[in-house]
Amino acid sequence: MSERKAALLALEDGRTFRGRSWGAEGEVCGEMVFNTSMSGYQEVLTDPSYAGQIVCMTYPLIGNYGVNAADAESNRPWVEGFVVREASRTASNWRSEETLDAYLKRWNIVAIDHLDTRALVRHIRDKGAMRACLSTVELDAERLVERALASESMENRELASVVTCARPYEVPAEGAERFHVVCYDFGVKLNSLREFARLGCRLTVVPASMSAADVLALKPDGIFLSNGPGDPASMTGVVEEIARVASSGVPTFGICFGHQLLGRAFGGSTYKLRFGHRGGNQPVREQSTGTIEITSHNHGFAVQADTLPADVEVTHINLNDNCVEGMRHKQLPVFSVQYHPEAAPGPHDAAHHFRRFIELMEQTAHKN
């Protein structure tokens, strides 16, 4: 570990951070963001919503409990690069199957440690999320800043097609099957599928490009719009299909990216947050009851409340910046939340939204 190479992180505004290479060697560019979770680094790495991004963990020691196959949220890590204060030299946990350093090397994820992550995060909070370049092969700051400036911006960037499944597949219900749910895969996390299966749902997971007609032909009891990466404004065609799904009368539940796409399908607008919400400590208030949930987040875009039509109600807001965290249609069986009720990693305050969707399917089935 003491012989590791130097590494350099350069931001598009000219700020640079020198540190040590760990994980794979190489060079990557992406949007520089940070996550405030104290644990769950493997879930962060394998969350498809991080495609196109270099992630900095604010918790200072990362890798101390290793990695294992059970904690993965997809079949591979999706981050472009990984930034930590200190990469743990040991992995000490009975569930550990591999060190984080070996895992990153195996998946060719470039990483850097021994830099001031607190200064980096404060800079991003002040200036906003921005393009960055992380390299172990180019250590000239000026040239690396130029490469960051030449990289692709997250605005209007379409990434769902990169992370979605290639073809439909089935996930069986655990125990007796109660409902059939079609999941639009914009970058779905495995724990969402597990939550539905535990509640007696058989899932058909379909690519992001599938038409509303083909989805409805599967005769689902409910439709789930998953999380995912990129700018929802880039998904014009998909939004049109979601509008058809939402108006069909089939109960529909969206989270994170799916929530943003629903907002646009309702006729609303979305906008880019200054530095986004990423971590497990976001306070959200349900407007009707005043109940506060501490929630897991990973998003850089949000629905603009004053662009939503009168028949869409904002149900939840973020107490840090008042952005829209939940909404429901007043006539149609459709609702969504901006945060992650599957909560992998936690907290688990919002898990009840899966049961809420089950109840909505039950109510609709009784009406029919």
Image: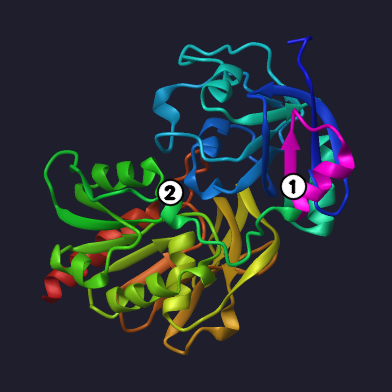
Q: Which of 265 and 130 is in front in this view?
A: 130
Q: Which of the pair 272/21 is nearer the observer?
A: 21
- The residue drawn where x is 39% and y is 49% is 188
Question: In this view of the protein, can residue 13 be seen by the observer?
Answer: yes
Residues packed near mark 2 inside 10 Å, few (<14), some (14 to 19) or many (20 plus): many
Q: Where is residue 183 in the image (x, y as percent from the top left)?
A: 29, 56
Residue 177 shown left or right of residue 318 in the figure: left
Q: Distance between the residues labelled 2 and 1?
A: 21 Å
Boundaries of the magenta span: 133-149
Q: What element carries label 2?
A: helix
Give me the disc on residue 367.
none
Q: Could you tell me the amino acid type at mark 1? A: Ala
Q: How far from the left and from the top, in percent, is residue 364?
A: 19, 71
Up-down relation of residue 29 to residue 114 (above or below): below
Q: Which mark is residue 163?
A: 2
**In the rendered structure, does residue 145 fall within the stretch colored magenta?**
yes
Label 1 belongs to which residue?
Answer: 132
